[in-house]
Amino acid sequence: MRWELVLVLLALLVLGGFYLLNSRGGESGTAYVSISGQRVLELPLKSTPDQIIDLSVYGVPASLEVKDHKIRFINVTCPDHICEKTGWVWMDGQSAVCMPNRTAVVVAAD
């Protein structure tokens, strides 16, 4: 009987953790895009419409996709695509970095 109680409590803790992580999903901050250490874009994720942002205008062969108050790298030409594999970022403190292109996206709370 004790093990069943422990398992139920553990399951509740795990589910509670997932709930807390997902409940912050709507609280998107601002995405700051920097290239070679220079900030080039500030995107308030709460109010930025869904779009593709072509970074080639800044000399970077990559794009950013903004969708559902989140942002991610897409269409990157670097060899390992680690930045694309990072996926969506939207919560305070999350980031995605494309090292070969010296490009970073950092989300900070408003």
Image (spheres, helix red, strand yellow):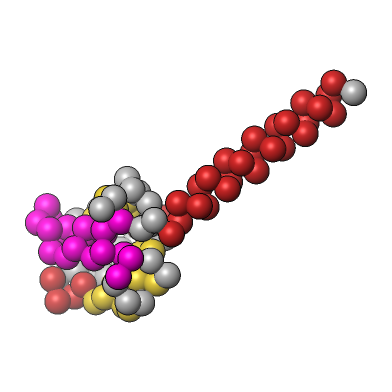
Question: In the rendered image of this protein, does residue 43 appear above or below residue 108?
Answer: below
Quadrant of the rendered image containing residue 31: bottom left
Q: How many marks?
A: 0
Question: In the rendered image of this protein, does residue 84 appear above or below residue 9?
Answer: below
- Most distant residue in the top direction: 2
* Rendering coords of residue 10 (x, y %): 70, 32
Task: Point out the stretch of residues depicted in magenta.
Answer: 29-47
From the image, give the main secondary structure of the stretch colored magenta: strand
Name the residue nearer the viewer: 50 or 52.
Answer: 50
- Most distant residue in the right direction: 1
Quadrant of the rendered image containing residue 45: bottom left
- Residue drawn at x 19%, y 63% as measured from the top left: 42
Asked whether, in this view, residue 97 is left or right of residue 25, the answer is left
* Rendering coords of residue 60 (x, y %): 19, 69
Name the residue nearer the viewer: 57 or 101.
Answer: 57
Decide whether residue 41 is among the magenta residues. yes
